[in-house]
Image: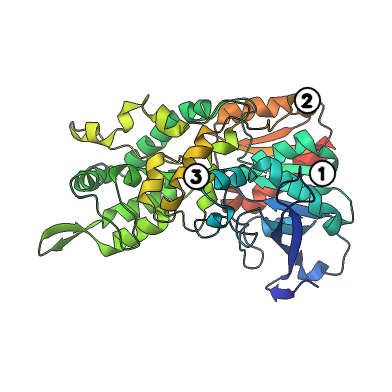
Amino acid sequence: MSASYRQPGVVLSDRRFTVPLDHDNPSGETIELYAREVVGSDKADQDLPWLVYLQGGPGFGANRFVGKQAWLGRALEDYRVLLLDQRGTGSSTPANRQTLPLRGGPREQADHLALFRADSIVRDCEAIRPAVTGGAPWAVLGQSFGGFCTVHYLSTAPEGLSTALITGGLPTLDGHADDVYRAAYPRIERKVAAHYARYPQDVERARRIAEHLLRHEPVLNGGYRLTVEAFQSLGILLGGGEGSHRLHYLLENAFVRTAQGPALSDAFQEDVQSLLSYAGHPLYALVHEACYAQGDRPTAWSAERVRADFPQFDAAKTLAGDGPVLFTGESVHPWTFDCDPALRPLRETADLLAERTDWPSLYDPDRLAANEVPVAAAVYHDDMYVDTDHALTTARTIRGLRTFVTNEFEHDGVRAGGPRVLDRLLALTRDEA
């Protein structure tokens, strides 16, 4: 019996499921999945259709909402919602530096983590759907990486879906990770330029911090080694609707005067550690590039290799002149595992994943071209995390897909404008139906 409890306007129930670790070996080892069922308190006794939510990431558990936050209130008008912690995240048999040694050495850990991509997540969904819906198809809402999972769902098990909704998550169907990052660095550069245009005082602030880090390279209180490259990766904030403002406030009080001279303030260091640490979502770092991998071509630390083609991101060279230090974001590098104490024990595991050459295909263009599931996608102009041109190319590949293209929101639009975005997508799928 699942435990049920209440928050304002909603009834919540904890759901736990057992699924195969490897769906190609259904009689082998199993793992546990956790999901939170949510229904409006005024509809708790009604027989409603289901919507399963697939979180962005990879590596993040489902949102821990309070009441009817963000898009959830709109969804609860029509659905019971299942907030699924994807395998390895949240309360679903976590995969991290503490648990992965149970698998064995780095090679065994890498083989294990190869089972934590969109293909396995979708097979998890299909394994638990009969227990949730009684076998009826359900709607899916996929945010960011959750959208990648949704396109895989449409490619492999469309019979399980009544409706597919995607927000900021239409992947390139056949592009390598190198293609993704070659498109990403110019987008990030535009975001940084827009930030400095809004906050020109941050140009000198960022240069001063970068110069300090090149000389000192401090270790933060939590053990994070703050290199200049790690500092630049704070640009991941610029992909969110309030991210530019958050970055500005972070930079404005970076230094304090001490008896030994200027030093990075404890407050700045604490905020930076919380933003850069992967302790709460290590799978993001471990399988981020693997989410793009298909076929026999390794990712081979794609973001790091491609960055060399964009020398303007080299902070040391920038500081030799008078230009602005460029931030980066939405990329994982080998040095990420050297800087972060939550990842250091997993560096060899990450290297083996980067070398892997036996990745299954994730998408089926032929099945997508014959799609019959009502599907709509929100595409954000100049999305820092997902390339708009790639997204629109994929949208044209999926039969019947309706797009809501907007510059009103950034990549986190389903959070910032959740009810409106979701309402628009639902209307588009109903128009199509």
Q: Residue at x 78, y 25 (%)?
A: 369
Q: Horizontally, is 382 left or right of 56 in the view?
A: left
Residue marked by disc 2? 369
Residue marked by disc 3? 349
The 10 Å Cα crowd at callout 1, few under 14, some 14 to 19, many 20 or more, is: many
Instruction: Choose the circle earlier in sequence order: 3 or 1.
Output: 1
Position of residue 200 relative to residue 247, above or below, is above
**Screen quadrant of the N terminus:** bottom right
Residue marked by disc 1? 161
Q: Nearer the viewer, residue 260 or 219?
A: 219
Instruction: Choose the circle earlier in sequence order: 1 or 2.
Output: 1
Contact flag, marks 3 and 1 (Cβ < 8 Å) = no
Q: Quadrant of residue 16 in the image?
A: bottom right
Instruction: Give the distance between the C-alpha atoms of the residues marked 1 and 2, in whole angstroms.
Output: 16 Å
Across and down, in percent, residue 428 comes to 76, 39
The 10 Å Cα crowd at callout 2, few under 14, some 14 to 19, many 20 or more, is: some
Q: Residue flagged by tag 3: what amino acid is it?
A: Thr
Across and down, in percent, residue 331 comes to 46, 39
Q: Residue 81's mark?
A: none
Across and down, in percent, residue 262 comes to 15, 57
Contact flag, marks 3 and 2 (Cβ < 8 Å) = no
**Screen quadrant of the C terminus:** top right
